Image (spheres, rainbow, N blue to C red):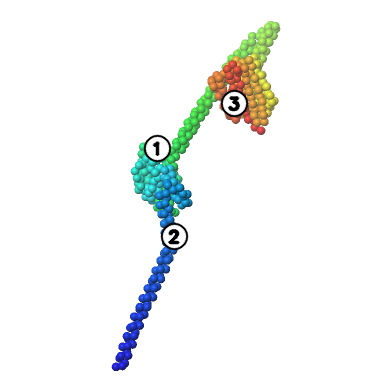
Amino acid sequence: MSYIIQNQLSEENTVLMTQEDIKDLKISLGLLSVFVLGYLGWILFKLIRPTYITYLDLITDLLAIKNNIHTSDRPLSSRENTLLRFRELNFAVNNAVLYATITDENRIAYISKKFEEYLGHNEDLTFRKFEEVLTYKHNQHHKIRKILSTATGELVNKELRLTNHKGEIFWIEMSIINMDNLKNSHRRLIVCHDITKRKHAGMEMQRVNRNKFVAEVQSQKDLSQQIMTAQEDERKRIAKDIHDGIGQMLTALRFSIDGIDFSNKDKAEESLHSVKEVFGQLIKDVRAVTFSLAPPELTDHGVASAIRKMSSMVGNFTGHNVLYENISEFDKRLDNNVEVNIYRVVQEAVNNALKYSESEYILITLDHTDSYLKIKVEDDGKGFNPKLTDTFKGTGNGLRFMKERVNYIGGELRISSELNQGTTVHIVVPIEK
């Protein structure tokens, strides 16, 4: 009996101890929970407080700017200045730059006001297809879509010829900037510049250059035709000179020789004397023709000597007062091409003076420096208006041929003349050192 009572007391004590332990455990867990929650709260407070303070300050600044921006005279803070400048920049960009952002489906996410006005749209363009907004021509849509789909680099530039809603052609330079490295990874920035004026200027320049080229080609054709005509006229002139001069003299010489009566000594001597005179004139005419075609003096002694000889022969043949003066005693040999062209230009100038100037004298002057040879052909004749070049045409297109020859050897030709004041032809030719 006593054993049973003892066991029951032992079981009751065990139960009571377990309940006390549970109570202590609950208290410990409660304290631990409070500590953990407090600690977590403290950590969250430390993490969130800077952001909270920043946003609170920003909201406070924005409210202050809104309420006081137009009334307060106090100096603006750096943040306020930044916000103001950002707003001004955004306004300026929106109203001055042609730009838009589009999605990967080419739909417009944002388009600047300036771009809308440029394209002639008044309605909201958001979510519209960019290529449909940019041009009204369906065949141009495919081209734009192809450019956008192949623009895989960070920056792609393209020039586009498009048509606006009025049917007018315009040109833009389009820059496509992929924004993969930004938050909007599926957006692209499109920046455009109107290059219509530049393109029109370029096309106008091409048109002018093309017309100029065609005109130059035609001018060369005309010049070639004129040169061939002049050459043919020169051949006819030489043939006429030979026929009328040398040919007739030879015929007269033949009849003179056939008519000599050697049985009459006195008459024979008289006839032989006449034959000698004809021979002398014949030799002069042959020399004159030869000299006009290819002066041997030019080949043997150079341009200065050839011009001197020409002035002497022209004076003798025509009876005109043709003077020659070599101021600097130029005697240098030049390239054969240069010498021939200088000689022909001087010859043409002298011939024109003889034919048209009605002058008392013709003066040919040579002078030179280390770099240039200067030649003047001047007369004291009736002169002319240099703008009316037909007056100074010489043989065919003499003045033009003179200019072409001088340009060919890198020289310069200038003509000065006044009515009743004579004419001067200035020729300047570079000398190779």
The local crowd at label 2, few if under 14, some if 14 to 19, many if 20 or more residues have their Cα within 10 Å, is few
Q: Is residue 247 above or below residue 196?
A: above
Q: Nearer the viewer, mark 1 or mark 3?
A: 1
Pointer 3 residue: 413
Pointer 2 residue: 50
CB of mark 1 within 8 Å of CB of mark 3?
no
Three-letter code, disc 3 = Leu
Instruction: Locate residue 191 relative to residue 320 in the image: left or right.
Output: left
Q: Secondary structure at mark 1?
A: strand
The residue at the point 58 percent across, 28 percent down is 407
* Quadrant location, the N terminus: bottom left
Three-letter code, disc 2 = Pro
The local crowd at label 1, few if under 14, some if 14 to 19, many if 20 or more residues have their Cα within 10 Å, is few
Three-letter code, disc 1 = Ile
Pointer 1 residue: 169
Instruction: Locate residue 310 relative to residue 190 in the image: left or right.
Output: right
Q: Is residue 105 above or below residue 34?
A: above
Front-lying residue, 72 or 92 = 72
Q: Is residue 298 above or below residue 59?
A: above
**In 3D space, how far apart are the residues under numbered discs 1 and 2 (Cα atoms)?**
56 Å
Instruction: Locate residue 91 relative to residue 230 in the image: left or right.
Output: left
Whichever of callouts 1 and 2 sits on the residue coming sooner in the sequence is 2
